[in-house]
Image: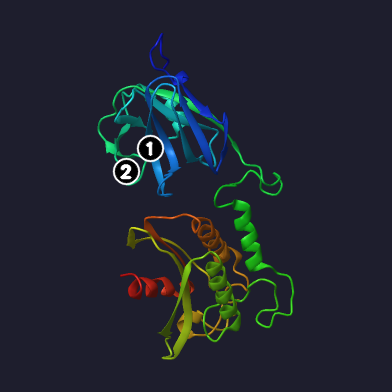
Amino acid sequence: MSGEGGSLSEEDLDVGPDELVSGHFQSVSLESGHDMSVYVPYLVRDPITGFIQNSTVIDIERGGSFSLDLLSPPRVSMLVMLVGEHGRTNWPVREENQSWESWLEDGGDSGDWGSAVARVEGNGSLDTLNSSEDRGGPVFVKTVQTVRGSTTSVDDGGLHSSGIVHGREVYERLYRITDPTDSLDPFDGKEGYWDRWAGQGNAAYEDAAQYLIAEFSSFGLEVMSHRYEYTDMLGAQNPEAYNVCAYKWGSLYTDEWLVFGAHFDVAPPANLAVLDPHITGIRTYGTRVGAYDNSAGTSMVLETARALSEFESRRTMVFCLWSGEEGGKRGSDYWTDYYVK
């Protein structure tokens, strides 16, 4: 759509810079040559509270400007911003399973079909949006090109995510945990944290848990470790494991939690002469390193905690690394039964 004469169009909105970097928060300026409202359907940071919210609508008068701290998604080639009359409340939006690019190709800017949102007053300085039945009619669409941040070569994974949680850094964390280099370490003889089968007096497991506690603490999070026991089929009490959980307390709703979790224990190496160690208490199957199950998940939780620890949030964020998963998710069950109230 385009305006004619003195009417409003997407050409009345200038967005700077001309090209944004995907996967990063960056300052974006909106300058208007006409009275307008602009729907920005991406994560933005409230300049007063510092909170992150999903989308906003900005009113700008002719000749005015507004700056936003905006997160460009990591795997798109362009952003869209919807332009409407000044003070507009209702807007058409893409479907959940549809990209903005395909929405535009299918004529979503006509406002004749699809989902809708309505602006409401937010808790901070930016308006927020709720779902609505009213699309409010047609909109003009401003597109902005994006490029993927290049921090590593293509051969080293440069086509993968380089945003707040950096794919390369997750991989390097995974390598650090599973490093096969021989060492004089008395627990597992490796530079990494091998042999992390839970409990049973396993010093290598205890060493790995201390590493996780230290890492979470270095992010400025409050760390809690929770010991638990279970009784095996032979009636023996097994001080199997403990969970390591780190908390970034919310500023408003401390008892509402966003939980990021994985298990950090691994299944012991194979021994066909005995049964599952979580049944008998004796080690049997698995590997010494557990790269896929579950050092990968452990690495992702650690890097997510590192990244999100720098943000304030209204709700509490909890980063948990549980144990005893191989025997039936004992650690996470224990945590939810006794520590989630």
Q: Quadrant of the rendered structure where residue 192 is? A: bottom right
Q: In this view, does 6 lie above or below 323?
A: above
Residue beneath the point at 47% across and 19% down: 11
Q: In this view, does 43 lie above or below 169?
A: above
Q: Nearer the viewer, residue 153 or 290?
A: 153
Instruction: Answer left or right for 259 relative to 220.
Output: left
The label on residue 333 is: none
Instruction: Provide residue 3's location: percent of width, then percent of height.
Output: 41, 13
Which residue type carries mark 1? Thr
User: Label 1, on which residue?
Assistant: 56
Q: How far is the residue under mark 2 from the one under mark 1?
A: 9 Å
Instruction: Provide residue 95's location: percent of width, then percent of height.
Output: 37, 35
Secondary structure of the residue carrying numbered label 2: loop
Q: Is residue 327 visible?
A: yes
Which residue type carries mark 2? Gly
Instruction: Provide residue 208's location: percent of width, then percent of height.
Output: 58, 75
User: Label 2, on which residue?
Assistant: 122
What quarter of the picture does the N terminus occupy?
top left
CB atoms at circles 2 and 1 under 8 Å apart?
yes
Secondary structure of the residue carrying numbered label 1: strand
